[in-house]
Amino acid sequence: MLLSRRALVKAVAASGALSALSVAGLPGAAWAANTAYVMAYFTETPQFQGADYGLHLAVSRDGLNWTPLNQNNPVATPTAGQMGLRDPFVFRKLDGTFIVIATDLKGTNFGQNSQYLHVWDSTNLTSLTGYRRIRMHTFNAHTWAPTVFWDAARSQYGIVYSCNSGGDVFMVNYTTDFVSVTAPQVFFSPGFGVLDGDIVVDGGTTYLYYKNLSNGLLYGARSSTGAPNSFTTYTSGLRMGNAIEAPLLVKNNEGNGWRLWGDSFSPVNADYYIWSTTNVGANSWTAMNQRDYTPPLNAKHGSILGITDAEYDGMVARWGTPNWVRLKSSNLPDYFVRQSNNVARIDPYPFDPYRDQLWRMVPGLADSAGVSFESVSVPGRYLRHYNYALRLDPNDGSAIFRADATFYRTAGLADATWNSFRSYNFPDRYVRHANNLLRIDPLSASSSVNDRQSATFRVTS
């Protein structure tokens, strides 16, 4: 007899054979059912112009390049406690539905302790229901960065979070319904301060990745039981950029590899870095190139979960995709095209005003087969070339303006899976960056590698 996915989960749960649960809380054999990913996050930018402490969602087919939903606006906002969230964590329960939990904290007032976590239920992430807060402890201490895993031996979910009551440790409470929880107990206290734990159960091993506060590096620990105080650190420390936190461990939907995300909290670095490995049990993480991934706009301290085709399509239909694009540089992959004082340039992300990198890519003003780029931050102004340099000007309706502001989107000169943009009225010239400024120059397939790379961009959101 064939069982439905949900019935299979219940049958395996009843048999007690849940040691093979994946990160999604489903049996290992169910990895193939997930073909896409969802990320939950909040947003911040260096000068907080893009700060929003509601629940944001983005989707991805490959788990690397992300599409924010709802125009990168929140899909839910806390209405109790500190009226804001950080560190949202999305988890699939054994019945196939979702739970979202998050830190009860708005902004950066880290001295404002809360004993609670925000909680929502969801059938398929097209709506968030049952909003509540659950009290985790009675300490005068924070309750930060929750993560959830299924403890098969206990037949309960473990909610692990960062807490400082005499020292920075991970605490755990157990629950079956995310309404009432057991008394808190210490989950991981290795003799130095720790922060931002993420837990994945894979086969008979429970993995815990965390930040070591004594040296600022990310580490992995593991346990054969998942029980409190049973974890042993097995990796070397990891860091990219000037500072890093919030490790996020993700098993690929295909089941043949892993990624470890780290969130940079430095305003001069990219918001995320990623390592990859084919063997999560070994000490063998390899840094990924930033050109291979693009996090959601302004995303901070998120969580990632595998979802099905139907769930992906349902979320896109419900929340919608952005009506703007961003242009990412091929050879400077942390740089994005922006306007600054009406001059077109590329600068490293993140920056403020963050909206200066958002463009409405519309049919070409001179030829609808081409494209034109209208600024989101200054509506009515378009990218156009003038003396070969690109700048932002208001559309004066003239034929010369329409021609200067129209480009043909072609296969990328350095990478055919990306794009290049050929000038409408100077058809041998392409948009490229030089000394951070944008201009149009004569380029072809025979141009130098550097020149072709400087004219290649990824259209992303």
Image (spheres, rainbow, N blue to C red):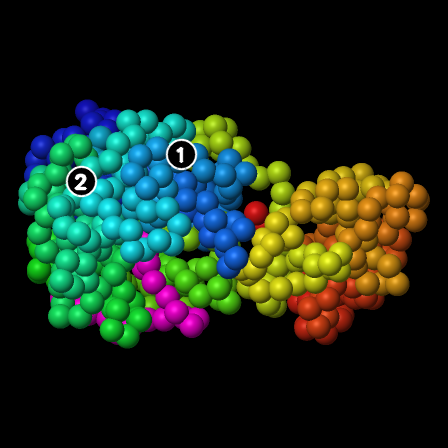
What residue do we see at 25% from left, 73% from top? 214
Q: Which of 447 and 224 is in front in this view?
A: 224
Residue 27 is situated, as x and y percent measured from the top left of the image, at 21, 41
In this picture, is 204 found above or below 449?
Answer: above
In magenta, the rendered stretch is 232-250
Residue type of the residue flagged with mark 2: Arg
Left or right: residue 264 compared with residue 343 = left
Residue 59 is situated, as x and y percent measured from the top left of the image, at 45, 42
Is 267 covered by the magenta stretch? no
What residue do we see at 73% from left, 66% from top? 437
In this picture, is 158 found above or below 343?
Answer: above
What residue do we see at 8% from left, 60% from top? 230
Q: What element carries label 2?
A: strand
Question: Considering only order in the chain, which callout, 2 or 1, is on the residue closer to the N terminus?
Answer: 1
Residue for badge 1: 76
Is 248 covered by the magenta stretch? yes
Left or right: residue 270 compared with residue 359 = left
What residue do we see at 29% from left, 44% from top? 104
Q: Is mark 1 on a helix, strand or loop?
A: loop
Res. 253 visible in picture: no
Q: Nearer the viewer, residue 419 or 372?
A: 372
Residue 256: quadrant of the picture: bottom left
- Between circles 1 and 2, the one closer to the viewer is 2
Q: How crowded is mark 1: few (under 14 residues within 10 Å), some or many (20 or more)?
A: some
In this picture, is 212 found above or below 322?
Answer: below
Residue for badge 2: 135
Query: Which quadrant would the N terminus be assigned to in this image?
Result: top left
Q: Residues within 10 Å of mark 2 (few under 14, many from 20)?
A: some
